[in-house]
Image (spheres, grey):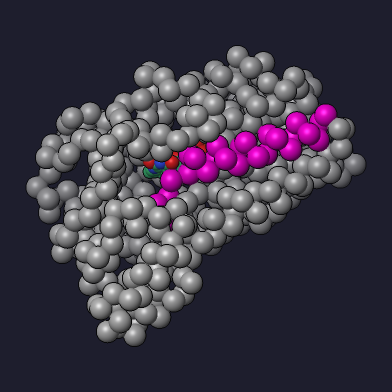
């Protein structure tokens, strides 16, 4: 088998790359080890409404569970911060359908798509990677390609086998545990997030409504914690008198929240999405980031193939770092500061911030918000808080 491009992984990043490159007229193969693309999900399924237009994805009710109008944040002592828009701001997807539809759009654009096809290793010739070895429905196959894209998620091994350094220590990952379950008593038009060192160390508990009385209820905590994420989630459910006997699905996953792969390209191999740790380190959302990286990567793959100059692929690293990378580096700084906050600090910040401020902080656009916080009386009185906030300027 010979293609211009082979893409390993049909999550979010992979199908975006495969679709864009196929649209430009090049031959592409998209593979995924799952027998059914998208299943099982490892996601709370929340995404901003902006991505549909930005990445040319149809707003299709088949993969939209629920439209969301904002968010509500809860502090350790129960202070609440609400951000509610008049219009829809985000959606809770059905990823089992969404991922499969993204692969379908790639197939419609001309890409070949093979489910139940697991990449096992790279093929080298004269020291150069010329393709991948895979297993398609238990049969060994070899796929030759000019360009290889590692979009194989957080456990990625293809980039590593090709010689790209994707290593990060355990502390730079969050462990998450999630139930899709029946739950009542929370406004189903908002996503809900609970913070606190006893609630979810370094992370938060989330309720992302998929229905009036059904939601993804999950937690992310630092993965080197002596207790498991499940321990903290079950504790939270118990303390809030929520029955854990209506569980429709249980998902476990790991989220890279500690920084991004430096070199995204080596010769003719590119790494995108979770495989490159391109995730918002503050809230752990990575779908939009995977779409952005996939869009930049596919632009340079098309240019490199058109001009028959694979050296152009390196521009993906440069462009990503100059745009999304720079923004996400700022978000990473915030995450490192929030890790040091006490429950009293969290109570204070949730009391004094506005919803719009919280949104700016999570997206990396926080300069003015931090300057305003530094003038707040309860911050001025605390040299420790001043020091923490100054780290962000
Ligand atoms: C519990 C949890 C909740 C989350 N909630 C959200 C959220 O609400 N919003 C959000 O934006 N993000 C969320 N995320 C993060 C989000 O799921 C990821 O950032 C996103 O899926 C990354 O897309 P990707 O394409 O890089 O990787 P993935 O979606 O992980 O796709 C990788 C694909 O590669 C395939 N694969 C792996 N190895 C091979 C191989 N050797 N051969 C062939 N195929 C292979 C896998 O089967 C998979 O389909 C959450 C993550 C977790 C764990």
Indicate the position of residue 277 as horizontal and vertical percent values.
55, 50
Image-quadrant location for residue 291: top right
- The tally of labels here is 0
Front residue of 137 and 289: 289
Horizontal side of residue 37 vs 77, given as left or right: right
- 330 over 138 or under it: above or below: below
- Camera-nearest residue between 321 and 375: 375
Where in the figure is residue 198, as x and y percent of width and height? 23, 64
Q: Does the magenta-highlighted stretch encompass residue 226?
A: no
For image coordinates 76% across by 22% down, the residue present is 26
Q: Residue furthest right?
A: 126
Look at 36% across and 49% down and name the residue there. 176
Query: Can I make out residue 301 in this image?
Result: yes
Instruction: Name the residue: 47% across, 29% down.
Output: 52
Q: Main secondary structure of the magenta part?
A: helix
Viewed as shown, does residue 172 lie left or right of 229? right
For the question of whether residue 42 can be seen, the reply is: no
Is residue 297 covered in magenta?
yes
As drawn, 57 above or below 161: above
Where is residue 34? Give x, y as percent. 51, 27
Q: Which residues are magenta?
A: 282-306
Q: Is residue 25 above or below residue 231?
A: above
Q: In which quadrant is the N terminus drawn? A: top right
Q: Is residue 156 left or right of residue 267?
A: left
């Amino acid at each position: 088998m010979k293609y211009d491009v082979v893409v390993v992984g049909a999550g979010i990043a992979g199908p975006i790359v495969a679709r864009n490159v196929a649209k430009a007229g090049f031959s592409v193969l998209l593979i995924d080890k799952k027998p059914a693309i998208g299943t099982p999900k490892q996601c709370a399924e929340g995404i901003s409404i902006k991505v549909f237009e930005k990445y040319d994805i149809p707003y299709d009710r088949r993969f939209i569970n629920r439209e969301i109008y904002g968010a509500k944040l809860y502090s350790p002592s129960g202070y609440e911060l609400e951000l509610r828009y008049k219009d829809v701001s985000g959606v809770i997807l059905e990823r089992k359908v969404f991922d499969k539809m993204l692969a379908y759009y790639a197939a419609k654009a001309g890409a070949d798509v093979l489910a139940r096809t697991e990449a096992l290793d790279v093929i080298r010739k004269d020291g150069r990677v010329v393709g991948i070895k895979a297993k398609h429905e238990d049969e060994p196959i070899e796929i030759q390609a000019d360009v290889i894209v590692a979009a194989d998620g957080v456990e990625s091994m293809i980039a590593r086998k090709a010689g790209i350094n994707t290593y990060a220590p355990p502390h730079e990952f969050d462990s998450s545990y999630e139930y899709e379950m029946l739950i009542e008593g929370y406004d189903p038009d908002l996503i809900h997030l609970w913070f606190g060192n006893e609630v979810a160390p370094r992370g938060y508990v989330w309720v992302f409504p998929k229905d009036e009385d059904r939601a993804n209820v999950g937690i992310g905590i630092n993965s080197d914690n002596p207790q498991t994420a499940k321990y903290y989630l079950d504790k939270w459910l118990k303390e809030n008198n929520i029955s854990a006997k209506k569980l429709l699905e249980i998902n476990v996953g790991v989220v890279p929240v500690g920084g991004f792969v430096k070199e995204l390209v080596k010769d003719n191999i590119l790494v995108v999405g979770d495989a490159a740790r391109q995730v918002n380190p503050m809230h752990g959302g990575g779908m939009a980031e995977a779409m952005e990286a996939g869009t930049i990567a596919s632009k340079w793959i098309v240019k490199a193939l058109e001009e028959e100059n694979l050296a152009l692929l390196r521009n993906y690293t440069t462009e990503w770092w100059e745009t999304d990378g720079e923004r996400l580096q700022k978000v990473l700084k915030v995450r490192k500061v929030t890790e040091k906050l006490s429950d009293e600090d969290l109570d204070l910040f949730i009391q004094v911030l506005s919803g719009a401020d919280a949104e700016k902080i999570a997206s990396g656009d926080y300069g003015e918000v931090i300057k305003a916080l530094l003038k707040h009386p309860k911050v001025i009185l605390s040299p420790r808080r001043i020091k923490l906030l100054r780290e962000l300027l």
